[in-house]
Structures are given as C-alpha cells and as structure tokens.
C-alpha cells in the first residue's frame, strides 16, 4: 500500500514581483517501508517537498494522500494530530530545546500528545537504552556531542512510532564518521518497517537508499524506482547504537552539487 | 497537552531566562507593593480618624452657633455665618428635652497660664461638670469641675496631664493657685493623660467653669454645646428637638447647626475612603505599566524562541497548546510578581506601623484583592497578544530561524 501519494503538486512562492515555482507537476508515490533519498542541487525544492510531506506546509495545487487519507484538506488542528501521530522529523541543526535534558527532549512529542507522565518515562527510558544514550539522560543539548544530539533528535522523532520518518540533511552538521553512524541508525529503523525519506547532498549517503528521487527546478527529474537494482539484504540490520561499518558500493551514479538556479522571474 | 505539563513547560521556559523573568516579576511586584502600602496609608488614616471620633463618645449631638450653608456638615462649610449668640441659657434649656441625657456648653480660647513661677500659652475650655461624663474623662488627682449654677461658676480649674508636667514638674497640683489672664483660680483636679487625640489634645487643656471662661474672653456666645442622647436610637429625635427648641428661642430663626457625630464620622469616612481609592488607582497605573512590560518580555520570548515554536509545531503541537504555554508563562510571571509584591507591601505596612505606632497601617482587603486581580489580569491580558503571535507562527519559517 502506498503510504504517500502526491498528485499534481504545485508550490509557488511569491517574492515581490517574482514567482518561484518551488515544486511543479509533482506526482510521486511511496510505498510503506520504503527508503527514499531526495537529492538535487540547492534550491531545487527538496526541503519544500519534505515540509509538504510533513504537513508543515500546504501545496498550492494537487492532492496529498497519507495512508490513503487526503490530508491537504484537514484543519490545522487535524494536521497537528497527524504530525503528532504519523510523522517524525529529523533536522540538520537538530532543533533540540536547549533548556531541556536529553530525556525531556525525547519525551516532548509524548508530552504534547498528552500521554501520561508514567507512560512517557517508561518509553523514554527504553528509547535512551535503544539509542545508546542511557548515560546522557540528564544532559542538556550543550553537554552532548553532535552525533549524540542527532541521536536524541532521532529518538524524539520516533518515540511516537510514526509511519513516516522525514530527515532533512540529517548529517549536514556532522563529520563523515558520525554522519554514517546516524544514517545507519535511520536505516535500522527503516529495516524495522518505518518509511524513511532522507534529503541529502551527499551522493555517498544518497546511493545507500533503495530509491533516489532527483529534484531539479522544482521538478522530479529522475526516479530510480524504475531501475531499482539493490536488494534489501545488502544492508544487514545491526544494533541501533552501533556503527554501520560496512562499505556500501554505489548502485546509482553519483550526483554532484549543481548550482542551477530554480527561480524564474 | 496536559494542564500540569503546560504549567511545567511554562515554568521551565520562564526559569530558562532568569534575568528577564526576574525583572518583570520585580516590575509587577513594585506595582502591587505600591498599591498595598499606599492603601495601608490611606486606610490607616481613615481608621485613625474613626477611632479618634469614637473616643469622643458615641451618642453625641453637637450644636454650633450659626447656620451652615448647606445644612449638612463638611469640613469646608463648618465655618458658619452670621451667628446669633448661642448662650448658656440656650444650653440649659436643652436639658429639659425628653431624649436628652446630658448637656455641656463649651467656650474655648487661648490664654496665658501663670503658676509656680512659670508661664505658658494654653487653650482654656470653659464648660460644666457634665462634660466629664460626656467625654468619659478619668481623673488623675482631685475632682472635675463641681456641680454648680452654670452662670456662677467658682474660681476653680482642672488641668491636663501635660500642663501639670510642665508647670508643676509632675508634683501634685491640687490646691495650687494659678493665674489665667487676670483671674486667680485654684486647681481642683488633674486629668489622666489620654495621649494624642484628634484636634485638641486634652492633656494640654485647662478646664474652667463656663461662666469664668465667658468673662475671661469677654463673650456671651458658646463655642459649641455637646448634647448626649439617652440612646443611639434617640439621636435623630434629639437632633430634631434641639433644632426646634433653639429655633423657638431664637425668634423663629434657624441659626444654629446641629450635627451628629455619625454625620461627621461618615463624612470623614467617605472622604478618606475616596482618598484611599484614588491613591490605589494611581498605584494601579504602575500595574498597567508592569503589564506592558510583561507583554514586552513575552514578545521578546516569542522572537527568541521562534525556532522552538516551529519545532513544537513539527512535533505535533496545536496552535492552542502553544498559545496556552505562553499565556501560562505570562500568568506565572504576573502571579510571582503579585505574590512578591504582596509580601513586600505587607512588610512596608509593617515598617510603617513600627515607625508610627498610633497609625493602624493595614491594607484593606478590597485593595489586596484588587491589586492581585489587576496584576494577574494585566499580565494575562498583555500576555494574550504575544501568545497568539506565537500560536500563529508559520512552522516552516519558524524552523528556519536559528
Ligand atoms: N518561504 C519562501 N519564500 C520564497 N521562496 C522560497 C521560500 N521557501 C523556499 N523558497 C524558494 O523555493 C525554492 C526551493 O527551496 P528549497 O528550500 O526547497 O530548496 P532545497 O532544495 O531545500 O535547497 P537546499 O539544498 O539549499 O536546502 C528556492 O528557490 C527557494 O528560494
Ligand atoms: Mg533544503
């Protein structure tokens, strides 16, 4: 079953007199449990697409069905409920609340959802263990390394057991080793059934995904779904907190940074 | 989000910026403390006056020569116009009225008292024996003025405690001679000290028979006549009877003013209540200023925490949840300020009472409730705008701020 179905999506920004077509004619379907990398040059609409998928933004035209339900017509509160229950976000800059501890940051979505404190504590404890953070429970973000911060952010994004995990350049602020670590963590979550959509500039990371979407000027230029070659068993599951050490050979051509401007006057 | 969690979240957010929070709490506290202290002063003054009046005796009707302009009493028109003499005989006639228990005519003036080789200026009150019962005076030594014909008083005097202190250095004074103007009088009694009173301090008075004072000051008219009713319920009857009788005696002209102590008291009470309310109102302006400060602080908080608000939305927070969290924060700052201010205000009133022990400087309940409610109200009111702004932030834009 397609967890995400986009049809005829348009997203237009008006900047003074100029009109920016951040997304045009977008038709994409993503199956439950897929691992998708969204790539493309800067300004090609990757973040816009991800925000739309995460219901942080609304398309100007087209329909978006999440788990078979049209979510573009929902009220803001209903959309908030969908974000709370079905969607997890991981950001490049972590976005941890600085005054809250690691445990409190992880528990934040549950607190917002009104889950009782005892249940929250139980699940946070489990998450801290799963993500190898049990020693860091009471540390504030500024007392954590970048990799630890992103692990806290991932724990937070998954604590509500969402259907879809959206990550916008999750390794952008990390060194390569730590970045691989984080990607591996996300992949393990994907192997456990969570649909994973990662925006990345890094071709090495992008090619690890089973499917690549290449964006350009707000359009979908290339979808590797048709020429999908990799088998699921290429990437064996490991412990969430461990290193994803195996060397992944690129299965799709590397995508360099392109600097084509996407805005049209 | 659960209410307890909203409150905890708001508390942690406020605690996350201690200086800013402390300053707005302080502003709110100063406002509330100002209301508490100033109304303590105002209401203290009111209680003080009421207590002093009550000490005068409660069933009292006072007759003043001259008709006051409005017929009512107020400090402004207490100065009466074109009086016909209010005489000792007028006063004597009042005793026969059925609702009247006691009557005391009073004449007052300044004179020099000369005794024991010392000289001082003093206020001399000419009155009669019943005055002591009306005012419930206690004697330290001797007796008060003797019962006698009001028009033929003996050459005797009763002095206040302070006069005794200053002229006789505290030695027993009964039997001593004093000179008042050109009269020589024998002291028959010394009054017990009653401390500071309203207006005239009886400790510094010299009492002489009314006829002696009249000849001393060469006057026929009385300063006033004190009339004591048989009971509190008789006050209005006494007022009516006294007015009618004096009108009849003065050739049909209503040329005296009859006031009850209640009326005087009510006027002062009203006046000082209004004053207290006015002072409270002025102090409340500082509460409005504090409210605006809280709004400013909350607006800064929204700007500073824009990214956090975007995150909360991405994590599934509804607009209402974010609004409530910021409102709760504003309310907490206001509440903390109000309680701190209340404590400060009570302390201020306590210091006032220590400095001026006779002055009952306690804040009235209404002022405390009004101050706390206004503090909370303005905090919440001025918190609404920033909270709504936070709730309306576009999550994508908000997340990009960092
Ligand atoms: N709020 C906005 N107002 C106006 N234009 C916008 C807005 N958000 C995005 N855009 C424009 O839409 C286009 C797509 O932006 P988007 O952020 O999706 O690019 P991106 O692929 O994520 O780029 P990058 O790799 O640099 O993050 C860009 O041209 C951008 O300038
Ligand atoms: Mg982007």
Image (cartoon, rainbow, N blue to C red):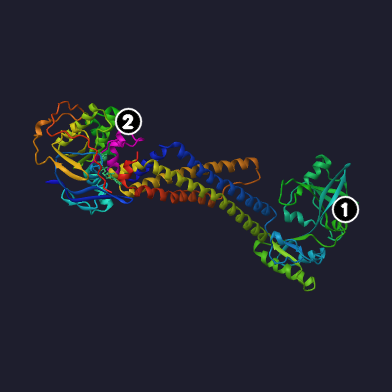
Q: Are marks 2 and 1 on the same chain?
A: no
Q: Classify the position of ligand 2 by quadrant: top left, top right, bottom left or bottom right.
A: top left
**Residue drawn 80% across the image and 45% down it:** B163
Distance, label 2 to label 1, CA atoms, is: 94 Å
Comparing B76 with B256, the one in front is B76
Name the residue carrying label 2. A138
Q: Quadrant of the N terminus of chain B?
A: top left
**Residue drawn 11% across the image and 41% down it:** A225
Identify the secondary structure beneath mark 2.
Answer: loop
Is any part of residue B330 visible from this angle? yes
- Is residue A119 covered in magenta? no
- Is residue A89 covered in magenta? yes
Q: Quadrant of the C terminus of chain B?
A: top left
Residue B280, horizontal then vertical, whole percent: 57, 51
Comparing B383 with B198, the one in front is B383
Task: Return the residue found at the far bottom.
Answer: B252
Residue A254, horizontal then vertical, whole percent: 16, 33
Q: Is residue A71 left or right of residue B190?
A: left
Please count the marks in the image.
2
First to last magenta residue range = A88-116
Residue B381 sits above or below residue B232 on the image: above
Q: Is residue A33 left or right of residue B89?
A: left
Identify the secondary structure beneath mark 1.
Answer: loop
Letter of the chain that mark 2 sits on in the rendering: A
């Amino acid at each position: 079953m397609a967890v995400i179905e986009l049809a005829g999506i348009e997203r237009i920004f008006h900047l003074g007199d100029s009109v920016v077509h951040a997304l045009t004619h977008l038709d994409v379907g993503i199956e439950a449990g897929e691992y998708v990398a969204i790539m493309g040059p800067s300004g090609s609409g990757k973040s816009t697409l991800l925000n739309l998928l995460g219901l942080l933004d609304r398309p100007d035209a087209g329909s978006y069905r999440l788990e078979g339900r049209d979510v573009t017509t929902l009220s803001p509160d209903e959309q908030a409920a969908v974000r709370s229950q079905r969607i997890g976000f991981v950001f490049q800059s972590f976005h941890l609340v600085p005054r809250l501890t690691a445990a409190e940051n992880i528990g934040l979505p549950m607190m917002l959802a009104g889950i009782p404190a005892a249940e929250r504590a139980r699940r946070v404890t489990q998450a801290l263990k799963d993500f190898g953070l049990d020693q860091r429970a009471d540390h504030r973000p500024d007392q954590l390394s970048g990799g630890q911060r992103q692990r806290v952010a991932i724990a937070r994004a998954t604590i509500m057991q969402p259907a879809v995990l959206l990550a916008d350049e999750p390794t952008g602020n990390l060194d390569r080793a730590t970045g691989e670590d984080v990607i591996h963590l996300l992949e393990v979550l994907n192997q456990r059934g969570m649909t994973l959509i990662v925006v990345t500039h890094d071709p090495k990371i992008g090619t690890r995904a089973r499917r690549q979407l290449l964006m350009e000027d707000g359009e979908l230029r290339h979808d590797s779904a048709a020429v999908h070659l990799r088998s699921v068993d290429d990437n064996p599951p490991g412990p969430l907190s461990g290193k994803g050490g195996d060397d992944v050979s690129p299965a799709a051509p590397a995508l360099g940074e392109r600097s084509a401007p996407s805005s049209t006057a | 989000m659960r209410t307890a969690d909203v409150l905890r979240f708001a508390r942690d957010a406020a605690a996350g910026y201690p200086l800013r929070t402390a300053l707005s709490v302080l502003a709110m506290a100063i406002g509330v403390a100002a209301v508490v202290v100033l109304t303590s002063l105002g209401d203290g003054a009111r209680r003080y006056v009421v207590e002093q009046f009550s000490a005068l005796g409660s069933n009292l009707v006072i007759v003043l020569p001259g008709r006051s302009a409005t017929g009512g009493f107020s400090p402004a028109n207490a100065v009466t116009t074109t009086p016909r003499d209010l005489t000792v005989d007028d006063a004597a006639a009042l005793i026969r009225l059925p609702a009247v228990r006691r009557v005391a005519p009073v004449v007052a003036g300044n004179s020099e008292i000369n005794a024991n080789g010392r000289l001082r200026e003093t206020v001399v009150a000419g009155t009669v024996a019943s005055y002591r019962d009306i005012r419930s005076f206690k004697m330290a030594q001797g007796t008060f003025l003797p019962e006698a014909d009001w028009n033929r008083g003996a050459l005797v005097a009763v002095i206040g405690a302070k006069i005794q202190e200053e002229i006789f250095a505290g030695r027993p004074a009964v039997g001593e001679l004093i000179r008042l103007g050109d009269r020589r009088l024998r002291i028959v009694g010394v009054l017990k000290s009653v401390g500071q009173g309203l207006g005239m301090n009886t400790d510094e008075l010299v009492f002489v028979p009314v006829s002696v004072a009249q000849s001393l000051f060469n006057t026929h008219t009385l300063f006033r006549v004190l009339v004591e009713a048989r009971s509190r319920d008789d006050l209005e009857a006494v007022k009516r009877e006294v007015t009618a009788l004096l009108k009849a005696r003065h050739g049909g002209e209503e040329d005296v003013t009859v006031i009850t102590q209640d009326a005087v008291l009510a006027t002062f009470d009203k006046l000082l209540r209004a004053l207290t309310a006015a002072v409270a109102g002025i102090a409340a302006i500082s509460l409005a200023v504090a409210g605006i400060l809280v709004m400013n602080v909350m607006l800064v908080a929204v700007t500073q925490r824009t990214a956090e608000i975007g995150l909360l939305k991405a994590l599934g927070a509804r607009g209402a949840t974010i609004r409530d969290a910021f409102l709760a924060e504003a309310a907490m700052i206001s509440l903390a300020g109000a309680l701190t201010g209340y404590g400060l205000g009570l302390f201020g009133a306590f210091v006032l009472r220590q400095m001026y022990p006779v002055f009952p400087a306690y804040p009235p309940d209404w002022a405390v409730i009004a101050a706390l409610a206004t503090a909370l109200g303005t905090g919440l009111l001025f918190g609404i705008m920033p909270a709504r702004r936070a709730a309306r932030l576009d999550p994508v834009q908000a997340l990009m701020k960092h």
